Amino acid sequence: MADKPTKGLADVVAASTAISDIDGQAGRLFYRGYDIHDLAGRTTFEETAHLLQYGRLPNAGELAAYGAELAASRSLGELAESCLPRVAGRQSPMEALRTLVSLAGGDDPDKDSNAPEADLRKATRLTARQPVLVARYHAARTGADLPEPDPELGIAANFLLQITGRVPDRRAVEIFDTCLVLHADHTMNASTFAARVCAATLSDMHSAIVAAIGTLKGPLHGGANEQVMRTLQTLDPSGVTRAVRERLAAGEKIMGFGHRVYKTEDPRATHLRRMSKELAEASGDDTLHRMSKEMEEVVFETKGLYPNVDFYAATVYHYLGIPTDLFTPVFSVSRMSGWTAHVIEQHSDNRLIRPDSEYVGERDRKWKPIGER
């Protein structure tokens, strides 16, 4: 008898990759062989995106050239530009990004090519434009004036400038840049797998990224950080322990805890917890961070679960002035670097991804004319 299929494809190796790796038992994450603890806070998001897409950390000249290419790629194409106001008026943030990225594909000069050089150019454009799309969407729906990107600033600084409407301070930029590095890739997660399945049909990069965005939209994947903040906002600061214990006793899931891969603390959460504390103290009101710490202690005491990347990312983004319903779009800003790297890798050594399935329905049913049914 054949083995029963693994539910949710847990522990099934779906592809070989040189992009990222996880040691779940030790709680370690690697990008192209570099430990995330060595990269976070030391390597900019632009360096990290180059590492993922090109396979190496850039030298000074390569980084300058890559940064210039990113800056030159921020402008939206005609299709996305003309449709953005209507999209912003009718669609939620992740729905809008799904639409706008698809529209951007129609204007891309390399849209009909999956050649390695064309894929790299598309990867740069997508990485450069994703933060602009999020900021432009937010401005369009709120009627706010959008500051122009500063060509002297990087992705993290320009995004905070356009979202908040003011020049961010140096430390806020450093923290947000570190957040982008921490979220850049995470092996064969649901959205990356969706992108690779799409790319494996030899569909184009924009189609694969649309598949990834649609997958990230789900609350069991990218939407968890938004749910963490909404949970915090429903709790009485003086009754966190009681409320969390009651929810757990009732069988409710507390978002932001546990992970399918890590058996110990998510290494990204280590950095995010520290940055949440720093931002909370700087803000003059550390209530949300203190509530988060209390939630963490209660969940671990009750369920033995560690916080994952989404838990402290919620308060970090909040303290940085990012609206709650843009938390998942911000995830896509960072993960675009990893998604595009995986599409490049899939196209470079492709085989159609076509898993088998186990049929569990009825057999040998007999057809009857409609009058006899």
Image: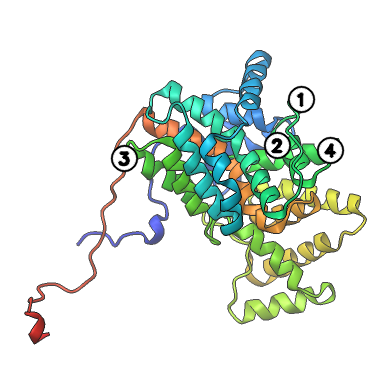
Cα–Cα span, label 4 and label 3: 43 Å
Q: Does dot 2 land on a helix, a strand or a loop?
A: loop
Q: Is residue 302 left or right of residue 366?
A: right
Reading the chain from its start, which is encountered first: label 1 or label 3?
A: 1
Q: Given contact means CB atoms under 8 Å apart, are the residues at marks 2 and 4 in contact?
A: no
Q: CA distance from mark 2 to mark 1?
A: 22 Å
Residue at x 65%, y 42% (from the top left corner): 182
Quadrant in the picture for residue 312: bottom right
**Between discs 1 and 4, the one toward the N terminus:** 1
Q: Which residue is mark 2?
A: 40
Q: Disc 3 or 2, which lies upstream in sequence?
A: 2
Residue 287, compared with residue 216, is above or below; it is: below
Badge 4 element: loop
Q: Mark on residue 31?
A: none
Question: Disc 4 marks which residue?
Answer: 167
In percent of the image, x 55 and y 52: which residue is there? 96
